[in-house]
Amino acid sequence: MIAMGKLRIGTAGIPASTKPRTSQNAIKHLAEMGLRHMELEFVRGVRMSEATALELRKLAEEYDISLTVHAPYYVNLNSAEPEKVVASKERIIQAAQVGAWAGAKSVTFHPAYYHNDDPEVVYSRVREQMEDLMETLDREGIDIRLSPETTGGLSQFGTLEELVRLGVDLPGVYPCVDFSHLFARSIGEFNSYKQFVEALQLISDQLGPQALQEQHIHLSGIEYGPKGERNHLPFSETELDYQGVLQALVDFDVGGWLTCESPILEEDALILQDLYEQLIKE
C-alpha cells in the first residue's frame, strides 16, 4: 500500500523501460511502478497534436498520473534581438497550450540570460515579458500556470530570490524550484537541510502558504564546475543532499509535483518515492 502524501513524484519524460516508447504507454507504466507524475518534455520543441494531448489527459486521469510541462530550452526573454524574444514567447505559449490540452497544471522554462546586463535591468525585462505572456494565456483561454525555473548556470537569470520576486510582482506565478540547480549555481554551498528549509520559508513568506501546496519541483544528482551546472548525475554519484531536500519538503508538508531529471529516470524516481513514503510515515 503506497503512503499517499501530497507530493506527486515522477519522471522527466518517458521512463527508459517503457515499451513501446510513447507518452501513452509511459502513463500506464508509471502507474504500474507506483509513481504518480510525469513531466512532458518539450525541451527540443513542441511536437504533440491536440488529439494526442487530449488522449493523454484522459489516460492521466484514468491512471491518476499528474502532468507538468517543460517548455523548449531555446528561450531567452532578455535577448538583444527582438525577434528572439518573440520566438521565445511563442515557444512558451505553444508548450502551455499543449500542456493545457493534456491537463497539465504548470509549465516551466529557463527564463533568460544576463549577458553583460545589470541584473536589475534583466529582471525588469523578464517581468515585462512575463506579464505579456500571462495576458496572452488569459486572452486565449489557456489555463496553465507559468513557473519559471531556478537555473543552474551563473550566466542565467533565475535565482530563487529573483523568481520569488517575480511571483510577488505577478500574482499567479510561482517558481519551479530545481534544488539541483540551486546547489550547482552556489558551487556546492546550497546543500544543507537548514538552507532547504530557508528556501521553502522564503516562498511561504513572500508568496503565501498556498505556494507550497502547488510546488513545481525538479530534483536529481548534478555535477558542477566554476560556472555552475555541468550535467545531471544519478543520486549515487552526487554530493547533493537529496535526502535532506525530501526531509524539508515533508516537514513543510509541501504538495505539488516533483520531477526527477536523473540520467536513470525511473530508478532514481523510485528512490525518491520510497524515501518519501518512509518520511511521511515517521
Image: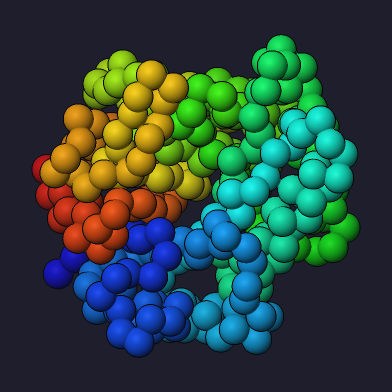
Does residue 30 appear to the left or right of 102 in the view shown?
A: left
Depth order, front residue of 149/248: 149
Residue 119 can be seen, yes or no: yes
Does residue 85 appear to the left or right of 203 in the view shown?
A: right
Residue 244 can be seen, yes or no: no
Q: Residue at x 43, y 44 (%)?
A: 217
Q: Where on the picture, by quarter, is residue 36?
A: bottom left
Q: Residue at x 50, y 62 (%)?
A: 41
Q: Residue at x 68, y 60 (%)?
A: 96
Image quadrant containing the C terminus? top left
Please provide percent x and percent y for residue 67. Answer: 49, 65
Please provide percent x and percent y for residue 64. Answer: 39, 74
Depth order, front residue of 147/8: 147
Depth order, front residue of 106/277: 106
Does residue 264 appear to the left or right of 67 in the view shown?
A: left
Q: Where on the picture, by quarter, is residue 29?
A: bottom left
